[in-house]
Image: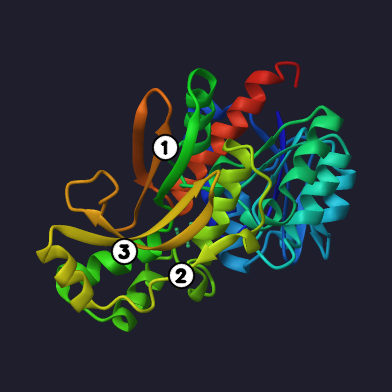
Amino acid sequence: MRLLLIGFGNLGRGLARSILEGGKFKDLKVVGIVDERGGVLNDEGIELRQALEVAESEGSVAKMGIEGLSAVEAIRESDADLVVELTPTNIKTGEPGLTHIRTALETGKHVVTSNKGPLVIAFRELQKLASSKGVQFKYSATVGGAIPVISLARRLASGDEILGVRGVLNGTTNYILTRMEREGLSQDVVIREAQELGIAEKDPTLDIEGIDTACKLVILANSILDMDVKLSDVKITGISRISPEALKLAREAGYTIKLIGNADKKGLDVRPRLVPLDHPLNIGGTLNAVSFRLRYAREITISGFGAGPAETSSALLADIMEVLASSPAS
Ligand code: HSE
């Protein structure tokens, strides 16, 4: 299967490293890489080790190919089977990812993405476009990182009915709350450390104010609860008012405080909630956890690492391998 990578920052490079290291990915041939400054296209397959070296030393792969090559041109011109869209999330317009994904689907290419913006803005449109073109559109990496939240939900929905979903969907705020609770530290101190871990959004207020959690909740509601909702449908309260004292008081009463996203047919909200200390959603550090409420199975909770290049690669590759498995001819 021929892959075109759009975006070659931390996530794109992480994916390239995973493809290089994993022997089982030998059927994946990267025929194009485009970043902000340009790109490189080669039908015979790009030497990934060299691309990684050039990107690290020059800050762009353009030096290996064409300075100024745009992602849209590359998507149109490439004969790739699958476009992996990894540009930064923009939740206001979805761009540039939205145009990249539209162009890829319109030109009959499968799409795998970790970019939340286009899904938050245009979920139904993109899904319809993919099905009208007979191609696949996969986005497991947008919610829960390495945790197979969406594929587990699809399996659960086939034999049961998902009544609602809730969870800790943001690693940055969970890390901040955990450090505040365990060490009595103030939010300002821990926010900086969370940024150093490299999992916070470029603008960390998106994490702190609950927006990132709300975006993931919108994606979950649209994809697994069969709803048609937008970010403006979510009632959002972040963690900025949570103090170490509040966490201490909660703990004395047998609870912790977590930033929880909750979606069911009654609506969507994101807010700090008391969680019993022995509840499976009480996970520490940068972990995420998602709990499904089901008609028959009652409750199923899954947890794991929800952010970071290696974790995101794990989800992207699972999606890519699923596309490969369903298109044996390429
Ligand atoms: N800022 C996000 C988080 C990154 O902390 O969970 C993963 O979507």
Identify which residue is drawn at 80% across, 37% down. 128
- Residue for badge 3: 175
Q: Are marks 3 and 2 in contact (CB under 8 Å)?
A: no
At x 57% / y 57%, what residue is drawn?
215
Cα–Cα gap, marks 1 and 3: 22 Å
Q: Which of 151/67 is in front?
A: 151
Q: Secondary structure at mark 3?
A: helix
Q: The residue under label 1 is which amino acid type? A: Phe
The disc at residue 237 is 2
Residue holding disc 1: 292
Tell me the quarter of the image containing the N terminus. Answer: top right
Q: Kindly indicate the quadrant of the structure image that contains residue 111.
A: top right
Label 3 beta carbon within 8 A of ligand 1: yes
Tell me what residue is drawn at x 78 percent, y 30 percent.
135
Residue 259's disc is: none
Q: Which of marks 2 and 3 precedes in the sequence?
A: 3
Q: Residues within 10 Å of mark 3 (few under 14, many from 20)?
A: many
Number of residues whose C-alpha sits closer than 10 Å to that of mark 1, classed few (under 14), some (14–19) or many (20 or more):
many
Height in image: 61 above or below 220? below
Kind of residue at disc 2 = Thr
Residue located 17% across and 76% down the image:
184
